[in-house]
Image (cartoon, helix red, strand yellow):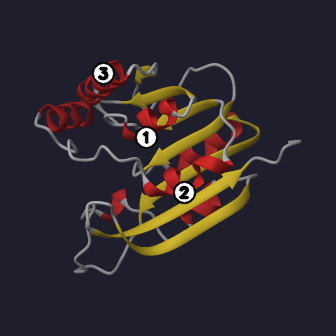
Amino acid sequence: MSDTDRSKWNRRYREGAYGDRKHPTPLLERWIEKIPCGKALDVACGAGRNALFLAARGFEVDAVDISAAGLERGRAMARGAGLKIHWIEHDFDSPLETTGEYQLILMVRYVNLPLLNGLCDRLAPGGFLMCEEHLRVASGEDLAGPSNPAFRVRPGDLQKAATGLDIEYSFEGRLRDPDGRQVALAQLVGRRPPHN
């Protein structure tokens, strides 16, 4: 990303973007009971809706985003809920310097396939990688999400990027978001083999 990206996202969050998205990603809600509590990394967390959900369930969360304004909104919600989350302002164009391995790494609607591939190495043995991205569709379809195809993945991209993981779940198609919008998504849940 760049200073331009940072400014764009800070402006969006200051203007109230995504303020109505307090619910965690439904994929995370469906899988949370299968993932042992431990250390979690929320990549490109925005205002932290998924980080808050994880912290409320006992996870030790590193929530990372380029937007200071988004992180501040998340901090305020965490304080109000009495939750402890480690908020990190970071541009993923440079390596993330956190310590230890993660039981769960979550990357939702931030397309960076080389980063996704590298995150697989940050998983603890038996740890889970969960990813959800907007899926490329035929132009002209009326679906929520970015109009620029660079911010959508092609079919099969997530599976190719999840090198060395056992794929527990994979989906590519249309769904309805909790806010009622029709979306085309690619979803993947991968698990690092327990003895790898």
Which structural element holds mark 2? helix
Whole-percent x, y for residue 60 in the image: 57, 25
Kind of residue sitting beneath label 1: Asn
User: In the figure, residue 18 lies in which quadrant?
Assistant: top left
Which residue in the structure is indicated by mark 3?
A: 80
Q: Which residue is drawn at 68% across and 22% down?
A: 100
Q: Which mark is residue 30?
A: 2
Where is residue 41? Give x, y as percent.
54, 33
Verify CB contact (< 8 Å) between mark 1 and mark 2: no
Q: Sort mark 2 into few (<14), some (14-19) or many (20+) by Cα contacts within 10 Å.
A: few
Residue 84 position, x and y percent, is 46, 19
Label 1 element class: helix
x and y, in percent, of residue 180 in the image: 26, 67
Picture layout, residue 176 above or below residue 51: below
User: Closer to the N terminus: mark 2 or mark 3?
Assistant: 2
Give the labeled residue for mark 1. 50
Give the secondary structure at mark 3.
helix
